[in-house]
Image (cartoon, helix red, strand yellow):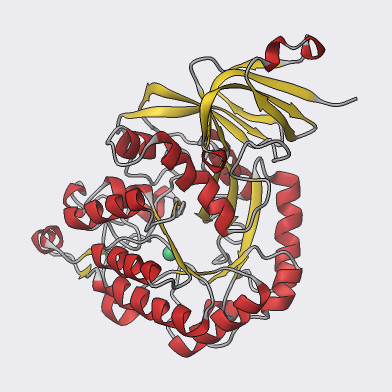
């Protein structure tokens, strides 16, 4: 017998179909069967189990293409189980896990191990990126074709840049032939060495070493040049600097195959807001100035920046207690990304609600070539989120994540995922 569930009376927002209307969504065997008005009243559907979505938005599940799950190697900070529980709580139904695990995810056997682990432990869909270079050492490319055959969803040395332009050129050429997306963490290490924050007035006041926005932008410009040279697609992770946004905008105008993402902390916060030496505000790239934040918002609004991703990077309290200059880089984000984006971008009139769903679901799904994700069209996977746009709440530990390193703790937010479904199954309910 078909397993059915009705999600009734919610405002369905589906950017792919330019749909924004009250609809009933019928789920059958983990897929969207239909989304239409008045379905709940149909004679044939009487008695179908029903979720009441009146007053809520019903959106395709969020796709977060930049997540660190820390497994294997640092299970004390996060695991596939806890990281995906955090995702579910935040309305994120698909994550792309980065390859900077210990050991680095750079071989087919490691991918097979991780995919089997995810099949057992994960509450949401988990895709895995494989490293661009062996051990992420930046010396020799991994075997892209074998990694793709083993299920790699993208290639990235994230955590580190691919510093050699020659290697990056060949990576883009090989990945193009295989249809794999290369994701680059843009940072010229010779410009950022020793820095713990952005190079600006707040760093100067606190006596901290900063990295200029140019540490990112010079590599963005290099990657644009290499994408233009090779015709290979490059995706730029966590853009943070105004000049980087402008470089991507100009590249796109010329038709260069480049895409980009921005993180909630970068479009919500600035370096001037960092309280004292609180390392829960330390990440790489760092929080930058007001002009950079404004440029990211503009880039999100005009589509220069395709996607919103968290760069969810759990670290234990001990590591983060070392203060701004010694603590490791990174903040968690899966449980707060939707709420921060709703508060800052939709309430802040930067994006319409439909554009927000596009940046957080449809666009990343398309960048990763995920058919059946990022839409609620009939036939799509029944990954969806019920959002209460008016819910006021304040993030506070403990979180579903094993870690609590977030600058958003204690910050009032508006809007929240109240139910998350993956393949038609409820994985989070408030
Ligand atoms: Zn990174």
Front residue of 278 and 244: 244
Total numbered circles? 0
Q: Is residue 280 visible?
A: no
The residue positioned 71% from the left and 28% from the top of the image is 34
Q: Quadrant of ligand 1?
A: bottom left
Q: Is residue 104 visible?
A: yes
Q: Residue 426 in the image: x percent, y percent?
A: 66, 28
The residue positioned 40% from the left and 76% from the top of the image is 224
Front residue of 220 and 274: 220
The residue positioned 13% from the left and 59% from the top of the image is 206
Q: Which quarter of the rendered picture does the N terminus lie within?
A: top right
Q: Residue 423 in the image: x percent, y percent?
A: 71, 36
Compared with 138, 255 (above or below) is above
Front residue of 234 and 329: 234
Furthest residue in direction right, as rendered: 1
Image quadrant in which you'd find residue 247: bottom left
Q: Which quarter of the rendered picture does the C terminus lie within?
A: top right
The residue positioned 44% from the left and 86% from the top of the image is 165
Q: Is residue 23 left or right of residue 289?
A: right
Image quadrant in which you'd find residue 97: bottom right
Compared with 336, 277 (above or below) is below
Q: Residue 297 in the image: x percent, y percent?
A: 29, 50
Q: Residue 339 in the image: x percent, y percent?
A: 40, 34
Furthest residue in direction bottom, as rendered: 166
């Amino acid at each position: 017998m078909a397993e059915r569930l009705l999600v009734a009376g919610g405002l369905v927002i589906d950017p792919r179909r330019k749909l924004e209307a009250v609809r009933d969504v019928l789920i059958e065997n983990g897929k969207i069967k239909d989304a239409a008005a008045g379905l709940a009243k149909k004679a044939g559907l009487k008695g179908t189990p029903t979720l009441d979505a009146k007053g809520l938005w019903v959106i395709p599940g969020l796709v977060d293409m930049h997540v660190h799950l820390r497994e294997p190697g640092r299970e004390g900070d996060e695991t596939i189980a806890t990281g995906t529980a955090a995702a579910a709580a935040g309305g994120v139904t698909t994550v792309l896990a980065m390859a900077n695990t210990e050991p680095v995810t750079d071989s087919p056997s490691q991918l097979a191990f991780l995919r089997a682990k995810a099949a057992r432990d994960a509450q949401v869909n988990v895709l895995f990126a494989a490293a661009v270079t062996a051990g992420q050492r930046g010396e020799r490319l991994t075997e892209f074709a074998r990694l793709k055959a083993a299920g790699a969803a993208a290639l990235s040395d994230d955590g580190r840049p691919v510093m050699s332009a020659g290697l990056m050129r060949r990576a883009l050429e090989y990945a193009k032939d295989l249809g794999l997306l290369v994701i680059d963490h843009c940072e010229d290490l010779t410009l950022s060495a020793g820095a713990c924050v952005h190079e600006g007035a707040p760093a100067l006041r606190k006596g901290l070493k900063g990295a200029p926005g140019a540490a990112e932008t010079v590599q963005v410009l290099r990657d644009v040049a290499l994408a233009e040279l090779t015709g290979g697609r490059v995706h730029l992770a966590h853009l943070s600097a105004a000049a980087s946004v402008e470089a991507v905008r100009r590249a796109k105008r010329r038709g260069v195959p480049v895409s980009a993402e921005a993180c909630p902390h970068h479009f919500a916060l600035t370096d001037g807001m960092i309280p004292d030496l609180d390392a829960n505000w330390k990440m790489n790239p760092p929080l930058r100035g007001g002009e950079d934040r404004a440029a990211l918002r503009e880039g999100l609004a005009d589509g220069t920046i395709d996607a919103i991703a968290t760069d969810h990077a759990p670290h234990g309290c001990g590591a983060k207690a070392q203060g701004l200059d010694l603590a490791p880089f990174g903040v968690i984000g899966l449980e707060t990304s939707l709420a921060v984006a709703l508060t800052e971008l939709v309430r802040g009139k930067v994006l319409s609600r439909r554009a927000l769903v596009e940046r957080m679901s449809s666009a990343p799904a398309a960048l990763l070539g995920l058919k059946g994700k990022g839409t609620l069209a009939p036939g799509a996977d029944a990954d969806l989120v019920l959002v209460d746009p008016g819910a006021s709440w304040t993030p506070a530990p403990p979180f579903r994540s094993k870690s609590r390193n977030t600058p958003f703790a204690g910050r009032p937010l508006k809007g929240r995922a109240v139910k998350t479904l993956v393949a038609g199954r409820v994985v989070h309910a408030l």
